Image (tube, rainbow, N blue to C red):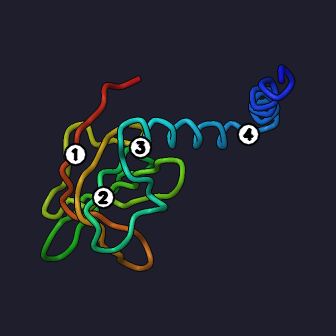
Amino acid sequence: MATDEKRPSLRRLLQRLTASEAELDAAELQRESAEQGCTLADQCRRGQMVAVSGRLRTVVYTPRTNLPTLEADLYDGSDVVTLVWLGRRHIAGIEPGRQLTARGRVAVRDDRKVIYNPYYELEAPR
């Protein structure tokens, strides 16, 4: 019995030793998202109201002729959800590397998951 109890911890140790930094970071983001009770991005479906939590990878201001937009890619370790704020050029605190939780209805644009004008909560910088 003692060897059976040690196998999962040995397996985890071997995974940590052989995994890349990106894989470890993705696993950590997924764990944090699950602890907060959020839906993983790869499980989000069109039309579903979700709360997703993760790290902003990119933030881009897209000037359009009629309506400026601010777009940010939120990565939670499983997939990316694009957050789009219509009519905004800049939002304080929305910057690459920032952790946040966003809530809204998932849409699909160009085969990408998108949440328009999400409610969001910034997390303290680490």
Which amino acid type is shown beneath numbered disc 3?
Answer: Gly
Which amino acid type is shown beneath numbered disc 4?
Answer: Ser
Element under disc 2: strand
Q: Name the quadrant of the N terminus.
A: top right
Q: CA distance from mark 1 to mark 4?
A: 30 Å
Which amino acid type is shown beneath numbered disc 1?
Answer: Tyr
Question: Marks 2 and 3: which is nearer the front?
Answer: 3
In the image, residue 119 lies at what x, y percent? 18, 50
Q: Are marks 2 and 3 in contact (CB under 8 Å)?
A: no
Crowd band around label 3 with a 10 angstrom C-alpha radius: few (<14), some (14–19), many (20+): many
Crowd band around label 2 with a 10 angstrom C-alpha radius: few (<14), some (14–19), many (20+): many
Q: CA distance from mark 1 to mark 3?
A: 11 Å
Which residue: 39% across, 53% down?
39
Q: On the image, numbered disc 2 is attached to which residue? A: 83
Which residue: 80% across, 33% down?
11
Q: Are marks 1 and 2 in contact (CB under 8 Å)?
A: yes
Q: CA distance from mark 2 to mark 4?
A: 28 Å
Question: Looking at the rendering, which quadrant does residue 43 occupy?
Answer: bottom left
Q: Which mark is residue 20?
A: 4
Which residue: 38% across, 70% down?
45
Q: CA distance from mark 2 to mark 3?
A: 12 Å
Which amino acid type is shown beneath numbered disc 2?
Answer: Leu
